Image (spheres, rainbow, N blue to C red):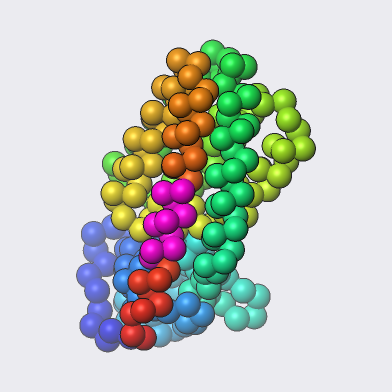
Amino acid sequence: MNSKRPALGHATRAEAAADELRRRILEGELVEGFQLRQDALAAEFGISRIPLREAFVQLESEGLVRILPHKGAIVSELSMDEITELFELRALLEPTLLRKSVPRLTAADFVELDRILAEYSEELHAHSPARWGELNTRLHELLLSRARQPKTSSIVYSLLQQTDRYTRLQLSLSREAAERAEAEHAELVDLCRKGDGRSAAALLKRHIEHASEELKGFLQARRLTPA
């Protein structure tokens, strides 16, 4: 671990600690399964355990860290096979639901979709990844909510929950990834507003595939990086 103390004054202590740990994880300095020791990190960063624990919780919400009973925080282990299977299922099922949902989306739905888009944009431009994954999931769920296929919808909502940590990670990989997701979401909502379910479904499939490709590319690169 780098013994040089990073400058943590640019944000709150918890946010700055989360930023530095996120950088180390994404750049491969901290590998999967690595235990994040509170005492050592608190001493290195010159902060108390409280903001450090807040940083761990933030990173857990992004899918980068897991907090385990009696063990503390560890860098998340990511499964290439799981990413492939879950995102392939989403790319298969979500476009089908979207085509059926588009004609039934209401004016109130579009008001809420616009609100989610605005909130995502605000969080993006504030460089605050904490809620990107949550807002992404809410937008997908609302777009699919009028399909009237409860069994398929139940499966898809389960897949969204299972991929939540991966989605949070994918959106945190780079500002470009988050900005592309923002643009694709805006285009999705626009196509749905126009009633173009076919084009919206095709875009949604590409959108999901982009996320999967970025995640697998990141995972391959990280595993090739020497510990």
Q: Number of labelled discs?
A: 0
Q: Which residues are magenta?
A: 209-218
Q: Position of residue 93 (x, y in %)?
A: 62, 40
Q: Which residue occupies 47% across, 33% down?
A: 202
Q: Main secondary structure of the magenta part?
A: helix
Residue 18 is at least partly visible in this image: no
Q: Position of residue 91 (x, y in %)?
A: 55, 44
Position above or below: 115 against 3: above
Quadrant showing the C terminus: bottom left
Q: Position of residue 16 (x, y in %)?
A: 32, 63
Task: Answer left or right for 18 relative to 37.
Answer: left
Residue 226 is at least partly visible in this image: yes
Task: Name the foreground residue: 70 vs 179.
Answer: 179
Position above or below: 102 against 207: above
Q: Which residue occupies 39% across, 28% down?
A: 187
Q: Which residue occupies 47% across, 77% down?
A: 32
Quadrant showing the N terminus: bottom left
Q: Which residue occupies 47% across, 65% down?
A: 64
Task: Answer left or right for 106 relative to 211.
Answer: right
Task: Answer left or right for 221 relative to 3.
Answer: right
Q: Is residue 60 magenta?
A: no
Q: Residue furthest right?
A: 151
Q: Position of residue 148 (x, y in %)?
A: 72, 25
